[in-house]
Image (spheres, rainbow, N blue to C red):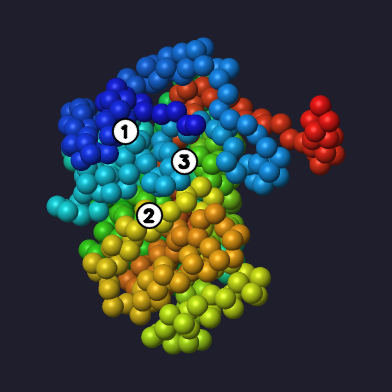
């Protein structure tokens, strides 16, 4: 179980959410629970003592309460289903999907400020929500957007570090290198070396995290332009928000692409703490590594084919389908290709999830965006048909608990339609987005004084001996 709700308003909302019929009223109610204070750091400074006391009481009152049983399957199966991590900013429900501080993606689309009426939520609004548990006003989001623009300065040595790599290096390799180069200016490292008191750890962590969140789109855009656009760099536009600016620096100024990037960054930002990138960031930071080191480690986990690299694999797989059978693929042809993929010992990318047991809401909102802006796209058609074809086949195989599409099943096709066709770069977009979730949680890790993570490991022999002893007793 992950315990969260950082303000009284959200605690009250939780009880209301237990009654589905009043959900819409609950969302309207929480939207009014805002303050006129535009300074995010001062908001946190007020919230932290309350949450420190809450965690202390939780440990004192319920520290010995058991959260479940650990089985051998869990130990050798990647710790699936094992509860063992505190993550404040989001919670993943197997049936409903991700909730950011209690709010689902459709609810966030409704209550978070947008760049235009009825538009997609601004990522800055989600950052405010993750850190404070409060839905911000448009004025607060605008102030945060301005602050991030002032922090979006990348030193020259970062570009030199990236340029030292071959241009053929994978974009994620270049991205991680750039983040590691940014670490030179870590405020946390400087403060720790000067002997900062542990009760103040959250303050330089806040500075590093916000600067990191602001800087990574600049670094990521530089890498994109370096590899794919002859190195012609586009500077930050002081009139644009976070998502639109990222789109602009990449080279896309279509307002629809700006909206797509706002949606993309928002829905990819956080997915509770057990996934590889989030857990890696938390684990490394528990050793008091600064946010740059922790986030760089998280990116290396994100770069794996079973995690963030999957969005690249999906688009390449769909293109292989079209290349073999043509754009007007029939359901039968698609079924045959899916079986061909599975019988070759490969997986169908974009389907299944370690926690979710229904269609990923992040897939659903991307599908809605596609239906609105690109319903006739030739790659969108097979994606739609895959939704009908793949789940029954995976269910028939009986080897997966969740045969439904996840977030990766759709993102590549959207990006490809609007001109961002370089699939090798897609995981970098994911990485930029994930800076918001990981950075937010790292601030709370230090504010709450969470300890060094150190689980117990076992050998196969020790497991065998334990199980034999348990069986004979």
Q: Please tell me whether mark 2 sits on a helix, a strand or a loop.
A: helix
Q: Residue at x 83, y 31 (%)?
A: 472
- Rendered location of residue 120, percent (x, y): 25, 53
The percent position of residue 180, horizontal first and vertical second, equals 56, 47
Residue 127 in view (yes/no): no
For disc 1, the marked residue is 18
| Cα separation between marks 3 and 1 | 20 Å
Q: Which residue is mark 3?
A: 272
* Lower position in the chain sequence, tag 2 or tag 1: 1
Question: Which of the two marks, 2 or 1, is nearer to us in this view?
Answer: 1
Callout count: 3
**Label 3 – label 2 distance at C-alpha:** 14 Å
Q: Secondary structure at mark 1?
A: loop
Location of residue 130 (image quadrant): top left
Q: Point out the image quarter for the C terminus.
A: top right
Can you say whether 311 is above or below 446 in the image? below
Q: Which residue is mark 2?
A: 362
Q: Residue at x 32, y 20 (%)?
A: 46
Residue 148: x percent and y percent? 32, 43
**297 left or right of 42 in image:** right
Residue shown at the point (49%, 26%) measured from the top left: 446
Find numbered disc 3 in the image and state the secondary structure of the residue it sits on: loop
Could you give the CA–CA distance between mark 2 and mark 1, rounded to whole angstroms? 22 Å
Judge whether residue 427 can be spotted in this image: yes
Q: Within 10 angstroms of label 3, few (less than 14), some, or many (20 or more) residues?
A: many
In terms of depth relative to the viewer, which is nearer, 309 or 170?
309
Q: Is residue 203 left or right of residue 169?
A: left
């Amino acid at each position: 179980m992950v315990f969260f709700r950082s303000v009284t308003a959200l605690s009250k909302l939780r009880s209301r959410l237990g009654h589905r019929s009043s959900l819409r009223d609950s969302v309207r109610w929480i939207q009014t629970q805002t303050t006129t204070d535009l300074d995010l750091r001062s908001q946190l400074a007020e919230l932290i003592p309350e949450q420190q006391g809450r965690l202390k009481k939780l440990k004192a009152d319920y520290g010995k309460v058991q959260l479940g049983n650990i089985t051998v399957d869990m130990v050798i199966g990647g710790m699936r289903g094992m509860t063992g991590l505190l993550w404040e900013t989001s919670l993943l429900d197997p049936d409903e999907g991700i909730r950011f501080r209690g709010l689902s993606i459709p609810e966030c689309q409704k209550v978070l400020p947008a760049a235009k009426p009825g538009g997609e939520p601004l990522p800055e609004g989600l950052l405010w929500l993750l850190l404070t548990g409060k839905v911000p006003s448009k004025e607060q989001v605008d102030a945060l957007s301005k602050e991030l623009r002032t922090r979006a300065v990348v030193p020259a040595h970062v570009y030199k570090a990236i340029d030292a790599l071959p241009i053929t290096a994978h974009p994620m390799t270049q991205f991680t290198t750039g983040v590691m180069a940014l670490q030179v200016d870590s405020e946390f490292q400087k403060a720790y070396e000067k002997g900062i008191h542990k009760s103040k750890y959250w303050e330089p962590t806040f500075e590093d995290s916000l600067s990191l969140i602001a800087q990574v789109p600049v670094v990521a855009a530089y890498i994109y332009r370096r590899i794919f656009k002859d190195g012609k760099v586009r500077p930050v536009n002081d009139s644009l928000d976070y998502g639109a600016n990222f789109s602009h620096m990449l080279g896309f100024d279509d307002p629809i692409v700006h909206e797509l990037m706002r949606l993309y960054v928002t829905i990819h930002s956080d997915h509770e703490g057990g996934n590889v990138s989030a857990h890696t960031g938390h684990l490394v930071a528990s050793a008091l590594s600064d946010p740059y080191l922790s986030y760089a480690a998280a990116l290396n986990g994100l770069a794996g084919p079973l995690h963030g690299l999957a969005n690249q694999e999906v688009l390449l797989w769909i293109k292989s389908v079209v290349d073999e059978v043509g754009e007007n693929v029939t359901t039968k042809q698609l079924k045959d290709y899916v079986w061909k993929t599975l019988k070759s010992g490969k997986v169908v990318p974009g389907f299944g999830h370690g926690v979710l047991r229904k269609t990923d809401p992040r897939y659903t909102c991307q599908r809605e965006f596609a239906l609105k802006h690109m319903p006739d796209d030739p790659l969108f058609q097979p994606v739609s048909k895959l939704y009908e074809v793949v789940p029954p086949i995976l269910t028939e195989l009986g080897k997966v608990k969740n045969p439904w599409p996840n977030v990766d099943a759709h993102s590549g096709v959207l990006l490809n339609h609007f001109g961002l066709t370089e699939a090798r770069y897609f995981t970098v977009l994911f990485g930029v987005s994930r800076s918001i979730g990981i950075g937010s949680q790292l601030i709370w890790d230090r504010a709450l004084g969470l300890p060094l993570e150190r689980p117990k490991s076992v050998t196969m022999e020790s497991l065998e001996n334990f199980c034999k002893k348990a069986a004979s007793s």
